[in-house]
Amino acid sequence: MTRQRKVRVHVESLEASGRRFVEAWRRAQRGKPVHEEHLSFESLEKLLSTLSPKRIELVRFVRRRPNLSIAAIARELRRDYKRVHGDVRALETAGLLEEGEAGLRAPFAGVDAHLSF
């Protein structure tokens, strides 16, 4: 059975992110499996600029309708191609979308977001 990937989104300092990495490394050294994927932002503002409502809509659309081109997605969502293209590239950089020969896909089963203030 294939494990469903889940991305965890955090707003945290670089130090906190580093501590989580070191703990995962230590678990791996002890032979324990580490199946974690994290996306960390140093501020709420940076998270919200990367995961804007339009980009979240785009990720949801790609999860429901994988393997479409950027042009096809722009047409389906009735959005400007250049803006969709920019959003896709930002989401690829964040690891939330992947583009292959068949088109775009969201390579995970879900996203968990946890904010602490």
Image: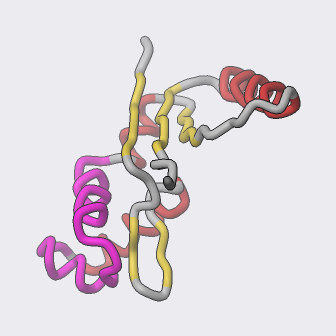
- Is 13 situated left or right of 45 in this image? right
Q: Is residue 23 on the magenta stretch?
A: no
Report x, y in % for residue 104. 39, 75
Report x, y in % for residue 4. 45, 48
The C terminus sits in image quarter: top left
Report x, y in % for residue 36. 60, 38
In the image, residue 25 sits, relative to residue 55, either above or below, namely: above
In the image, residue 52 sits, relative to residue 15, either above or below, namely: below
Report x, y in % for residue 10. 50, 30
Q: Residue furthest top?
A: 117
Residue span colored magenta = 52-79
- Is 24 situated left or right of 93 in this image? right
Residue at point 25%, 56% (across, down)? 60
Residue at point 56%, 31% (across, down)? 42
Q: Is residue 67 on the magenta stretch?
A: yes
- Is 16 situated left or right of 30 in this image? left
